[in-house]
Image (spheres, grey):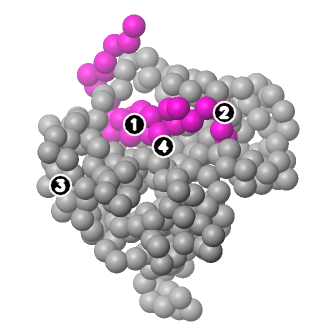
Amino acid sequence: MTTTATEYKLCELMICAGADAFIGNGEVLATGIGVIPRLAASLAMKTSNPNLMMTDSEAWMVSEPNAISGRKPGDGQHKESWMGFSRIFDNVWGGKRHAMVGPSQVDQFGQTNISALGGTYGQPKVQMLGVRGFPGNSISHKNSFCVPAHSKRVFVGGECDVVCSIGYNPERLPKGYSFEDIDLGLVITDLCVMDWQGPNHQLRLLSLHPGISVQDVIDNTGFELSISDSVSTTTAPTKEQLAIIESLDPKGLRYKQLLNNPAGDRR
């Protein structure tokens, strides 16, 4: 039996919504890049999908997710096996992975950018990480997105300034690939939960966080969304989920991820 929490922070609502992205995935490697995605994957492993695989962020497979804060040198972990780079790549290329990442830009096709902003390709206004593993990841396994500040600066009109990952754009599909090979999961933001299951893989609004309206989401998105007549409210965390999150982050790094650490219910 579970009890719905009445007081929770927005970051915790996003963590619980993010955990839902891994439901039904079975035995795949769950990779959460960043505090909220990592806690979301860890929560899923301890609740809705115990078959998930996780690493200690280095090379050990663990049967219990490690806490992201409060660990001391010498603290043990539940090691299961070694997963060096060669095995990681076998896993990635074999499609047995689900990554939750935080792109700097997302466009109408589900393409993302973590490389550079503005200017030209040769001389951008802002240089960031580079494409990293995004190109190969996007054609090899499932990817979900976590966006802590939903705005038109992130959900851009047209295309991303630099296209780092493949989405549902027929002009950029690699030779021999089809939309059936692209697997984009949930999009978790500070306003709502979305997915790419609208008409022709249009970004679809699934639920609104408490206190957020459909118009709020429309006003902060640079392209048209698929919106049903009845959009649900994002499910509040349970007390049991919050207890697990606290055990995984006893020092509260999650509270530093969103500006001013807002409440989950903003009504």
Vertical arrangement, residue 14 with respect to residue 129, above or below: above
The local secondary structure at tag 2 comes to: loop
Q: Position of residue 160 (x, y in %)?
A: 43, 75
Q: Which residue is mark 3?
A: 216
**First in sequence: mark 1 or mark 3?**
1
Task: Say what amino acid the circle numbered 2 marks.
Answer: Glu
- In this view, the mark in front (3 or 4): 3
**First in sequence: mark 3 or mark 4?**
4
Q: CA distance from mark 2 to mark 4?
A: 21 Å
Q: Residue at x 28, y 35 (%)?
A: 234
In the image, the segment drawn in magenta is 1-29
The label on residue 17 is 1
124 or 107: which is nearer to us?
A: 107
Q: Which residue is mark 2?
A: 27
**First in sequence: mark 1 or mark 4?**
1
The label on residue 257 is none
The local secondary structure at tag 3 comes to: helix
- In this view, the mark in front (1 or 4): 1
Left or right of residue 169, residue 182 in this image? right
Q: Which residue is mark 4?
A: 36
Task: Say what amino acid the circle numbered 4 marks.
Answer: Ile
113 or 249: which is nearer to us?
A: 113
Neighbours of disc 4 within 10 Å: few (<14), some (14-19), many (20+)? many
**Quadrant in which the N terminus appears:** top left
Vertical arrangement, residue 235 with respect to residue 220, above or below: above
Residue 147 visible in rendering: yes
Q: Are marks 2 and 4 in contact (CB under 8 Å)?
A: no
Q: CA distance from mark 1 to mark 3?
A: 19 Å
Vertical arrangement, residue 142 with respect to residue 106, above or below: above
Residue 238 sits in which quadrant? top left
Q: CA distance from mark 3 to mark 4?
A: 22 Å
Q: Residue at x 46, y 20 (%)?
A: 243
